[in-house]
Amino acid sequence: MDALKITMPALGIDLGGTKIRAAAVLDNKILGEPRQIPTPNGPENIVRAILDLIISFQGQYILKGIGIATAGIINTETGEVIGATGNLPGWSGTPLKLVIEKSTLIPVHVENDANAAAFGEACARNLRDKQCVCVITLGTGIGGGLLIDGKLFRGAHWGAGEVGHSRISLGNKRLCTCGLFDCWEAYGSGRGMVATARDILQGLTPGQTPLVEMAPELTTRQIVQAAQKNDIVAQRALNVWHEHVAIGIVNLAHILDPDVFVLTGGLAECVDFELLHEMVVDRCMVRIGENMNIQKSELDGLAGIVGAAQLIMDAISERAK
C-alpha cells in the first residue's frame, strides 16, 4: 500500500464565503498541496461540493477524520450550524456533521472557522500553554478565536469570539452583513476597506486617482496595489483601515489582556505590523500597551485547515481513552 495511505491523516476543510479550501494534515503539517474551489450558492450545493472534495482526497489518503471549519455559530457537540452570517445565506440549520458522517462513515468535527484558525495557530506555534491567545481573522469579514489555558472558549451559547460584531461607532453609518450597524467587521474587513476607500473617493476625479473609475467594482487588491504605486488616496484609505483594525484590537486588549494577538486571513498580508502596533499602543492603557504582542500568522491562510484537522484528531483521541 502507498506510504501516504498508511499515515492516515485528517482532512481539514475551511469553508468561507467565497472559497472552500482543503488539505490533508498530519502532526499540524499540511501534506501536499491544498485544493481550492469556489463556494457555491445554497446549502445543498455547498454540502455536495464538500463531499466531492472529500472523495478527491480519498483517492490519495486513508482519512482518519474530517475537520470542517465554517463561518457561522456552530454547536460543536452536534455539529449543526445554528447561526449563519450574511456571507453564507441559508446556511443556518444545516446538520453538517450528521450529513457528512452519514455519507462518508468517517468521524467529523465541525467548528467555527475563526475558532479553528485560532486552534491551528496555537498548535503550530506551541501556544497552548499560554493563559490567553486571541486570533483575529481578517478577510471578507472579521472572525475571532479565543484560547483560554489552551482550550477554545466557545461561550455558553456557542457564540463567543464573534469579535467582528462588536460595535466601534455610534453613528449608524455602516450596515454589517449581520444586520446590525457599525460592527468592527463593517470597518476592518475587506468590505470595510472598500467602503472606506469609496467614502474617501467621493468628490474626487480620475485625474486625482484612477481608483475613481474603479469605484463601482473596487476591490481590496486594487486599493493595495494603488497604494504600493504611491497613490496618496489609496494610501489614505489603507491608513484609515489600519486605524479601524487597531480600534477593535484595543477593545479586545482591554477586555482580555492576552499573551498574544495573532492576525490571520487574506488581509493579514496587507497589514503594516509596525504601524498597527503603534496605533494600538497609542490607544491603550499604559500597562496593557507596554505588553502588547501582535504577530502575523505563520500558516499563510491555512490556519483554519490545520485547526479543523487537529480538532478532529483530538476528538478521536479523547474517544479512545
Image (spheres, rainbow, N blue to C red):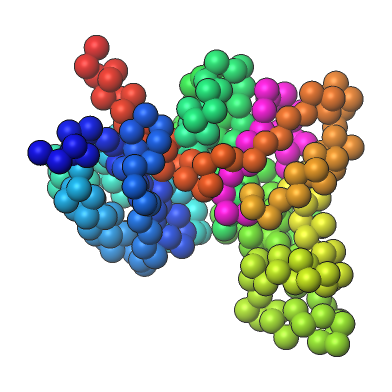
Rendered location of residue 294, percent (x, y): 71, 35
Quadrant housing residue 77: top left
Q: Give the side of residue 2 with respect to residue 30, left or right.
A: left
Q: Residue at x 59, y 36 (%)?
A: 135
Asked if 222 appears above or below 285 in the picture, the reply is below
**Residue 63 seen anywhere in this rendered image of the structure:** no
Q: Residue at x 29, y 46 (%)?
A: 96
Q: Residue at x 36, y 51 (%)?
A: 33
Q: Give the side of residue 291 with respect to residue 125, left or right.
A: right
- The quarter in which the C terminus is drawn is top left
Rendered location of residue 148, percent (x, y): 56, 20
Quadrant housing residue 68: top left
User: In the depicted view, which residue is nearer to us: 243 or 7?
Assistant: 7
Q: Residue at x 62, y 31 (%)?
A: 134
Q: Give the side of residue 104 with respect to residue 191, left or right.
A: left
**Residue 318 seen anywhere in this rendered image of the structure:** yes
Asked if 85 appears above or below 75 in the picture, the reply is below
Residue 257 within the segment the image draws in magenta: yes
Asked if 266 appears above or below 250 in the picture, the reply is below
Quadrant housing residue 206: bottom right
Rendered location of residue 35, percent (x, y): 35, 56
Asked if 280 appears above or below 245 in the picture, the reply is above
- How many numbered tags mark residues here? 0
Query: Residues in magenta?
Result: 247-267
- The quarter in which the N terminus is drawn is top left
Rendered location of residue 137, percent (x, y): 58, 45
Residue 214 within the segment the image draws in magenta: no
User: In the depicted view, which residue is nearer to us: 262 or 253?
Assistant: 262
In the rendered image, the residue lying farthest to the top is: 321
Q: Give the side of residue 12 with respect to residue 289, left or right.
A: left
